Amino acid sequence: MKRKLNWGWLLRMAWRDGKASRSKLVLFMASIVLGIAAVVAIQSFGITLRENIGLQSKSLMGADYIIDTNKPPSDELLKIVDSLQPQASEMSFPSMALFLPQETSKFVQVRGIEGGFPFYGDLVTEPISAADSYREKRQALVDATVMIQLNLKIGDTIKLGSQKLPIGGALKSIPGSSNLFSSIAPPVVVPKDIIEPSGLVQQGSRVDYNYYYKSDNNLDLEAFESRLNPKLRKLDGDIDTHSSTSRRLGRRYENFGKFLNLVGFIALLLGCVGIASSIYIYIKEKLKSVAILKCLGATRKQAFLIYLLQISAMGLIGGVAGTLIGLGMQPLFPIILGDLIPVDIQLVYSFKTVLLGLTLGVTMSLLFALYPLIKTYQVSPLQVIRIQNEERETLKTPLYFVIFGILIFIIAFARWLIGNWKYALIFVVGVIVAFALLVLMANLVMYLVKRFFPKTWSFETRQSLMNLYRPQNQTIILILAIGIGTFLISTLYFTKDMLLAQASIDGQKNSPNMILLDVQSDQMLAVNDKLKGAGLKVLDGIPIVTMRIQSLKGKFVEDIKKDTTATINRWILNHEFRATYRDSLIESESLQKGIWVSRFSGDGIVPISVSDNFAADAQVDVGDHIVFNVQGKLMETEVNSVRLVDWSRLQPNFTVLFPAGVLEKAPQFGVITTKVPNAQESAKIQNELVRDFPNISILDLRQVLSVIEDLLAKISWIINFMAFFSIITGIIVLIGAVRTSKYQRLKESVLLRTIGAKSEQIIKILSLEYILLGAIGTLTGIILSLFGSQLMAWWMFEEPFLPSIFPFLVLFPGITALVWFIGMLNSREVVVSSPLKVLRKEAK
């Protein structure tokens, strides 16, 4: 007759046994707490960010929807715009502004506004009244940061082209301005009707025309957008609704969150290594207790369930603790991310993230503890009276099921985090390879030490080396825990340095650090003379001709747009290209395929060169024909070559390149690049150029580089902060691993002291062992990260890899010292306990 399980008795037994071993179970629980905290914190903040963006999407845009175009609107487009009755309109473009009486210039984003914009959100100014009065009083609102930087006051004068306006107020915020872009081109708001008389809008000027609408609440914006957009796109227009903008922003920050999720997930996996290790040792020590239970009549199933309940409870407690820590961390994200977040954050705590944390705690605990728990099934009651435990053959079928379950869970969870099966598999394979290499390294170390054991070395050294491969050693788990954490941090530092190296312009001798935009054809010689007169060398004088694609490989663009099966990237079909012509390639370009034609003087089909990204997105190759509409004139061209372009260089690069002899007579404007020695000279020449050529925009790449470096520094800090969870988890796993072997060390201490070893000798033995383990694990992690970063440099960045010295000078000695400290701290009882005390403990 089948006995019914007494769950009350099982729970009481699990509780009593757990109380006696709570210190070991707490360490097991701590192994997963930080990993869960990292994932919960990021997931919770992701939900908060999405909800805030959704709630504040109207305030971000300032309207329900916008119709916009980046070229002067045609009569057909204006008919559609006017029929919908816009409540406000705007002309927006980058330009230089001259501030008087300071005689200082600044690259700004001019926003000429007409009407009651914004309809949602606030135009925040100081004084407050300036937001309502600047149009009537014909004043300018200048970015508050610029006011402070240039020591400007209310009433000072700003000159935009030929127009002078008094500064009516400091602009603190306005819907539609990005914090990141504002740090490069701060906004200046003016009445729209001063734009045309200013003379700033000329050939080649990059002007955005925006029309703002406040709609009826009953209007279905998604259906309205899908119905209107095809008509607008035919006329070079576009529509953006607050809901579509919300989704776009959400996706942008969601991708960043997914990357951070992976960092937290690795910390979680590392904690699972700690679970498997600590439970393995814990169950091994409990096998005698299991044998006693079976002698008293407990079944194999009851013994198994007692410890399964313990592990489940600890996993649940770990999940609760990790979830609380993760939710507690959520308020830190708005502080850390700062200007990267486009909305004011109101914290949202979701039940979904709480459930996620609890589920992760229990699921990961059970999955990684199942295999050690299976050993309780194999324990014989006779083991109580046996002097030495015997190792039984492992049950292979349950092992395969457990491994399969772990892999399925990890892949499915990674797929949920990343949102793509392919990338999830690549990630999981990468993690498995990293873990496998670290395990291989640990086994190699043990083999080499055993194979080439230095028998003539000192007693302490020989004993330390023997500890690396002795029975019940923790070499593999310690090297794995140390190595994977070091690997993560080192890779992040190497990657950050690669990104900063790509952005750097100061180290490149001939690279420009100032770009002059919108230089008209009749101004080129005068601007060149002005620069030479200031002692500056003109690096490039680049002519630019605007054009659009009329047909692609014999198919008209409008027909391709209507074809629902077409896979050509939409930007190719809608974009106004700024092309140039010259007779040579530059440093940032290299020929990928085809033949470069430097000059063309015929009247037939014009040979051109396109960038590799253009070729991929337009689905063209060498020999394909493209017809361009060059400001009303159709020009048939043939792709004669494809170029690799280094877009990371802060200099003008082009997707479409014509040979010399073709576009010289086309309407054009120019871009001039130069290099100024310092910030003082940069400010001086900018002021002179703005006074003489007010239509020219000057981009100071020093400022752009500073913004990029600040952004990278923030992102790097966040990534390092999250990766630190892996290091802390590794330390907890390390503490657990050392602690589980502590009683084995006590036995060794008794034996060593019995044969005459002193405390100083035991300290030397332990110190050397932990220094070796720390050094091997840390060095292996750094070497693995070197290889991984090199692969990223080849495949992702296409840049030479110059490794940072930080991991070698700081991480290597720092983590090695930390391993030694934790090892000695946890082993202090080995040194201070007397042999008699240990023997009494063992006899209990």
Image (spheres, helix red, strand yellow):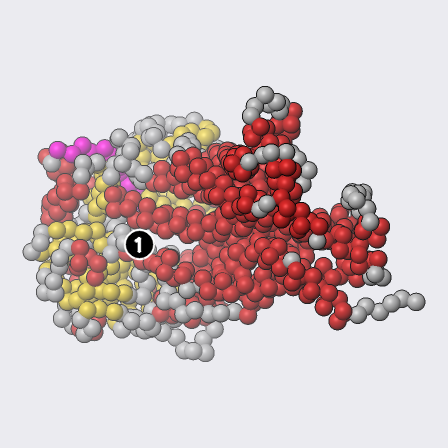
Q: Residue furthest right?
A: 1
Q: Is residue 538 magenta?
A: yes
Mark yes or no: residue 114 visible: no
**Residue 560 appears at what percent x and percent y?**
50, 50
Q: Is residue 169 magenta?
A: no
For image coordinates 75% across by 47% down, the residue present is: 400
> Toward the viewer: 807 or 705?
807
Graded by Cα atoms within 10 Å as few (under 14), some (14 to 19) or many (20 or more), the crowding at tag 1 reads few
For image coordinates 17% across by 55% down, the residue present is: 149
For image coordinates 33% across by 28% down, the residue present is: 584
Is residue 767 found left or right of 591 in the rendered image?
Answer: right
Q: Which residue is mark 1?
A: 181
* Location of residue 241 (image quadrant): bottom left
Q: Residue furthest top?
A: 456
Residue type, mark 1 in image: Phe
**Residue 736 appears at what percent x and percent y?**
58, 49
Is residue 410 found left or right of 144 in the rendered image?
Answer: right
For image coordinates 62% across by 59% down, the residue present is: 22
Number of numbered discs: 1
* Residues shaded magenta: 535-547
Where is 660 relative to 169, above or below?
above
> Toward the viewer: 46 or 80?
46
Badge 1 marks a residue whose secondary structure is helix
